[in-house]
Image (spheres, grey):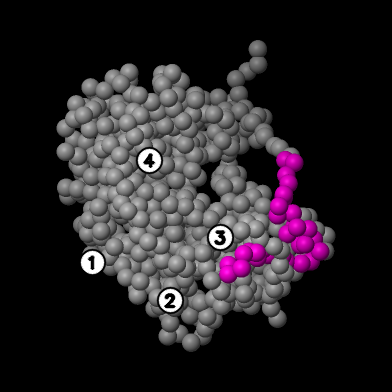
Amino acid sequence: MPARTKSTAKTPSDDAAPRPKARTGGRKVYMVAGGVTKFAKAHPSMDFRLMVKRAYDAAMQEVPNLTPDRIDGTRISYFSDHFSRQLKAASMVQDYLGMNPKGSVRIEWGGATGGECFQAGYEAVASGRMDVCLAAGYETMSRVATWKGNEFIALASDTNFDFPLGGFYTGYYALMVVRHIYEYLRLGKFAHVKDEREAQRLAIAEGSRIMSMVSVKNHLNALHNPYAQYPKRLTVDQVLRSEMISYPVTREQICTMSDGAAAVILCDESTARELTDNPVRVIGVGCGTDTMRLADRPFGKVPLMAHEKAADYEHLRYPGVHSFRAGRAAGLEAYRMAGIENPNRDLDFIELHDAYASSEIQTYEDLGLCRYGEGYSFVERGDPFLKGVDYGFPTPQAGAIPVNPSGGLIACGHPVGATGLMQGVFAFWQLQGTIPTHFRDPALQLDHPKRGAIHSHAGTGSSVTVSILERGF
Amino acid sequence: MRARPPTYSKFRDAQAELEKNGAAIFRDAEGVESLIIRYPYSINYIHSYAEDSPFFLALAEGKLKGSRCTKKGCAFVFATPRSHCMVCGSPTEWVDLPNEGRVHSWTTCHFGSEAFLKETPYNLAMVEFDGVGSLLLVRLKDAVEKDLFVGMPVVARYDPKPKYSITDVWFVPKK
């Protein structure tokens, strides 16, 4: 078997950094309302302004005591000017909503645009600049054919070194998961297989099967979410046999292009008490980054969570291309602020940026739900599945920490600038206990969840946000 | 007055009409009608490789260049060039990269961006080099999906007619 790699002498993150102190995050920030449009392949009867208006109106309906004049300003997000075919489109949202002359800024941060917009709204309130902030976002991806859309998205990779090679995000994620499978299945479960190529073949087959279980979970959960774009019951076999997009990633393991919008209303404590008796508090925010090019990722040491030990990862060269250091950094920052020591114990659910079934598994590890290398067994044990749902295979520990109870990006769709905000809305309803009303179906309502996380992810993991939400007063 | 463009209740059919005649009406499930037009857009950029120019000029001469940090005690070597070190911030200098390496990871793309669809299937590989601290993303040719594996020895090939693009270099399995 080849060595893990013989290539590097020393690496950028070899020295373990001292533990940064937990930040307070400023004033207490509450979410009091959220709204989403249905995510769909295309909404040709609504332009981006009207889509955001619909999501905003839905949010405002939830807080009848809030009049628009009390909104101090907005943060508006969309990912791509190419998709919008309109620069400064956020200004047009601002005026369509009747928000002029209040302050506003457009937020863009790749795939994490929505999550970043959520945190920009948080910051506006936490800093005391605003008492009430509307954070709203959209994407209109139906404006071009799917493969042109893939090109627009791939332009968010290095256009000198990556894009001209056939730049294609599914290709990048396939490169990452092939290495993830190598590190943790080839050198783990299949370490005993002598023939190198046979061992790698077996490891990829095993990894693909487990990725498919994640896809089955998210599509099936979405059957009870009326906002989801692609709810369906699938078998592991159907996912595996769906069209090969970039080996070993198949079509059903990937999210799709969508049109949609989402809006959340964030405010300070006294306003929250006035507006609602059922708010949710944002108790932690975190953001991490990594190199734009996958090729530049270091081979260093794992930044440890409170419940991990350096000895756990003695031989792991991190992050390489197998893990998302930005996700780990975002998680660490958010957990510290929220006082979370063990996310598995202290969180009740996560809305996780599953643009790919593979990245959901990688992210379990980055967010400390299991140790690095345990992502596949975490799925097989059933921890991220919903209790009481028949997924067509055993999920013995279902309900341990449900991930993407809404169906995630894979099943809900991924209108980039709205996605992270959509997660905020679904998490908000979960914590409020209002999923049965909003989904007109009680199936996805977890049993009195106290605390949840939303996770938004960009590029090949070049920027990631994590926000922690907790039931209010 | 010019007639209304034809109306379709399937979005795909409306799209097809745009390709032919440039306009269509789409009627959604609620009966709402929207006018859709074809809107072409293309640009020729005046693009400079700037400080990375020597890398692309070297490719055109059939050489692979990386960057080495000039600071003593750092001397980090990057396979994908950068003019300042990501570790310590010092300037880097150009160094020759080995012509051979190993596959660190790989995939076969059966689809791609619109610009590359006609080239599918193609292989992408991240290549690791002895003595080099970071990787290089390349096309891997003369091999099909079932041949590829992590650790596979590969060797660089260069386009005799350079396009001044990262595609001027690709790798093939080492015989």
CB under 8 Å between callouts 2 and 1? Answer: no
Which residue was labeled with disc 4?
Answer: A119
Question: For the N terminus of chain B, which image quadrant?
Answer: top right
Which residue was labeled with disc 2?
Answer: A315
Indicate whether residue A25 is drawn in magenta.
Answer: no
What chain does mark 4 sit on? A
Marks counted in the figure total: 4
Q: Residue at x 39, y 78 (%)?
A: A189
Quarter of the figure with residue A125: top left
Q: Residue at x 49, y 29 (%)?
A: A90
Is B74 situated left or right of A370 in this image? right
The tag on residue B88 is: 3
> Furthest residue to the bottom?
A194
Task: Kindly report the distance in space between the C-alpha atoms of the residues bearing marks 3 and 2.
Answer: 24 Å
- Against A425, residue A252 (above or below) is below
Q: Amino acid at mark 2?
A: His
Indicate whether residue B58 is drawn in magenta.
Answer: yes
Q: Amino acid at mark 4?
A: Gln
Task: Kindly report the distance in space between the C-alpha atoms of the residues bearing marks 4 and 3.
Answer: 30 Å
Q: Amino acid at mark 1?
A: Pro
In the image, residue A329 lies at what x, y percent?
40, 56
Q: Nearer the viewer's eye, disc 1 or disc 3?
A: 3
Q: Are marks 4 and 1 on the same chain?
A: yes
Q: Which residues are magenta?
A: B45-74
Which element type, helix, strand or loop, lies under badge 4? Answer: helix
What chain does mark 2 sit on? A
Which residue was labeled with disc 1?
Answer: A396
